[in-house]
Amino acid sequence: MKHVKYGQCVKCGRTYSAAPDLTTCECGGILDIVYDYEYIKTRLTKEKLAARQERSMWRYRELLPIADSTKPTSLRVGWSPLYEEPRLAEILGLKRLWVKDDGQNPTASLKDRASAMAVAKAQEAGAQVIACSSTGNAASSLAGNAAAAGLATYIFVPSRAPKGKVAQLMTFGATVVSVQGSYEETFELSKQAIDRWGWYNRNAAINPYLSEGKKTVSLEIMEQLGWQAPDYIAISVGDGCTIAGLWKGLKDLYAIGFIDRLPRLISAQAAGCCPLNRAIETGEDWRPMEENTLADSIAVGVPRNADKALMAIRESNGLTVNVSDEEIMAAQKLLGRTCGVFGEPAGVTGAAGVKKLCEAGVIGKNDTVVSVVTGNGLKDVANAIKSCGEPISIPSDMDRLLSAFAERHIAVD
Ligand SMILES: *Cc1c(COP(=O)(O)O)cnc(C)c1O
Ligand SMILES: [Zn+2]
């Protein structure tokens, strides 16, 4: 990999050659993949990219840590739509607003970007088995992308994981362990099992290639916007890998001269579980929190990628915003009704944050914003029904229909 220099520890600066099974530094720090941007500039131009047929995350292969001989994974991951939403922008009082619907990935979340990368790197490493622990989406995306590549998976999820995600896991043929405990306890058991059996490790933050997969979301956003950076990009935050990856992609594009300014990040967490935002807001080190939110994908009390996430938010001069479960569910409805986009609770937490910042007057009519929807609403229908209610339920009878409409003051005529 001529374009990759090495993996470098974000804590102590030590470097490691970029082997496909790279994990963390000896000091415990997380590694960041460092590129040779001068070399990449000689290989990739905007024109070359524009002419490319590949409509997936692999269209950016010059900026990804894969060998020249590594083929794109078989499921179509990435190249999700970026919708401009003028009506929602008007409701919120923003100059311009776009929604990036990453729920349209093959297993219906942004995690497919990291899992496809894990599969590609596991294949480079010659591994037959991949394992991870996950709040749900890393698991289902790994199980799906690995199944398509003919690799076996061992998956650890907390028992609270929503049924939709568990159904995906079982359908993709993973060996699934539902741990009766928190995500933290789930992570610990997976770590012991991975150490014991030597499986390829797809755990968040441990494997430094995963955020390189996730960064393709910002590469796409910028290409879809014609390389004109918005003022803000909003995204929900759990372990912190996603926001760190998103920032890495923006910095890559800046380094090779594809964009001439960097957006500010909006880090959205659930008020009931916001250890990273709390650290930014108080200026203190992060401390664990309870996992107290219905947004299961970001109910992460002990964030695994705190260093990189905090660095990303700070470097971007970013904003933090913490939203209640009610605000999350209100945003789910609002996106559904004004955009036709259905996100899971954690998927719409970024949008809930944007709404809250608009209402507080922190951002407004001079600002352009991209809000990333990170997961599809069909993954967790129970919470959506609880929040949006049940339909009219009647027999096939016109009189009953008329009276049902009358009772609900639905003016059909
Ligand atoms: C994993 C996930 C996130 C947060 O990503 P982190 O890397 O854990 O910060 C947000 N939304 C959804 C739907 C997710 O699955
Ligand atoms: Zn180190």
Image (spheres, rainbow, N blue to C red):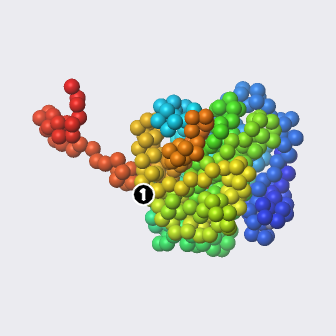
Q: Secondary structure at mark 1?
A: helix
Q: Nearer the viewer, residue 159 or 173?
A: 159
The correct choice, above or below, for 118 with respect to 393 in the image is below
> Residue 176 location in percent, x, y?
51, 64
Asked whether residue 182 is in view, the answer is: yes
Asked whether residue 378 is in view, the answer is: no
Q: Residue at x 36, y 51 (%)?
A: 387
Q: Nearer the viewer, residue 12 or 276?
A: 276
- Ligand 1 is in which quadrant of the figure? bottom right
Q: Nearer the viewer, residue 169 or 30?
A: 30
Amino acid at the residue labelled 1: Lys
Q: Disc count in the image?
A: 1
Position of the C terminus by quadrant: top left
Say which quarter of the image contains residue 20: bottom right
Seen as rendered, the residue at the extreme left is: 399
Q: Residue at x 87, y 41 (%)?
A: 38
Q: Residues within 10 Å of mark 1 (few under 14, many from 20)?
A: some
Q: Residue at x 62, y 69 (%)?
A: 287
Residue bearing the label numbered 1: 163
| 306 sits to left or right of 327 | right
Seen as rendered, the residue at the extreme front is: 361
> Residue 94 location in percent, x, y?
55, 35
Q: Residue at x 74, y 62 (%)?
A: 30
Q: Nearer the viewer, residue 215 or 67?
A: 215
> Residue 52 location in percent, x, y?
71, 29
> Residue 217 location in percent, x, y?
64, 43
The correct choice, above or below, for 343 with respect to 143 in the image is above
Instruction: Specify whether tag 1 is near ligand 1 (CB below 8 Å).
Output: no
The correct choice, above or below, for 126 with respect to 215 in the image is below
| 115 sits to left or right of 401 | right
